[in-house]
Amino acid sequence: MNTLRNKVQLIGRLGQEPEIITFRDGNKIAKFSMATDDSYKDKDGNKVERAYWHNIVIKGGLVNVVENYIKKGQEIMVEGKLTNRSYNTKEGEKRYITEIAVNELMMLGGKN
């Protein structure tokens, strides 16, 4: 059962070009937003479509895959876990952000 705890799997499209951040020690992370969509029928029978946006963070060897092959609009599948962090704005306000820390990634939809 432990493998099912805090596990997230999403299929969606990149909303922006991945941001690659390189640290002084040479390690890198990749960050981008990913949209998943859903639809349902409202009380009048009209189809309603919604997009949900997710903050994605990738570390380790998968950063090279993202850096070389993943582009805005591309459909991918990610698997990872939900993480939370906080930061202070320039105005001193504390903000919270939920991210998906990815440990597996699969490119979908064929060649671009």
Image (spheres, rainbow, N blue to C red):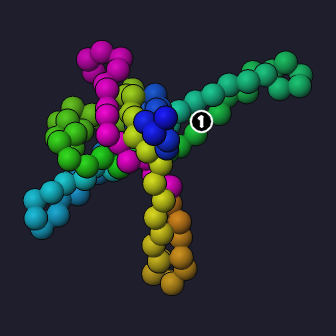
**Amino acid type, residue under disc 1 in the picture:** Ala
The residue located at (85%, 18%) in the rendering is 45
Left or right: 9 in relation to 105: right
Q: Can residue 93 be seen in this view?
A: yes
Question: What count of labels does the image hold?
Answer: 1
Residue 68, position in %: x, y?
17, 36
Decide: is 92 above or below 77. Answer: below
Residue furthest out toward the bottom: 92
Left or right: 28 in relation to 91: left
Residue 22, position in %: x, y?
17, 59
The residue located at (54%, 76%) in the rendering is 94
Q: Is residue 16 visible?
A: no
- Say if the magenta span includes residue 45: no
Q: Quadrant of the C terminus?
A: top left
Q: Is the magenta stretch mostly helix, strand or loop?
A: strand
Looking at the rendering, the stretch of residues picked out in magenta corresponds to 98-112
Residue located beneath label 1 in the image? 51
SS at circle 1: strand
Decide: is 106 above or below 33. Answer: above
Of residues 10 and 52, the one nearer the viewer is 10
Residue furthest out toward the front: 1
Residue 15, position in %: x, y?
43, 40
Decide: is 95 above or below 56. Answer: below
Residue 57, position in %: x, y?
35, 49
Of residues 65 and 18, the one nearer the viewer is 65
The residue located at (45%, 39%) in the rendering is 2
The residue located at (53%, 66%) in the rendering is 96
Which quadrant of the view contains residue 44? Answer: top right
Decide: is 18 above or below 104. Answer: below
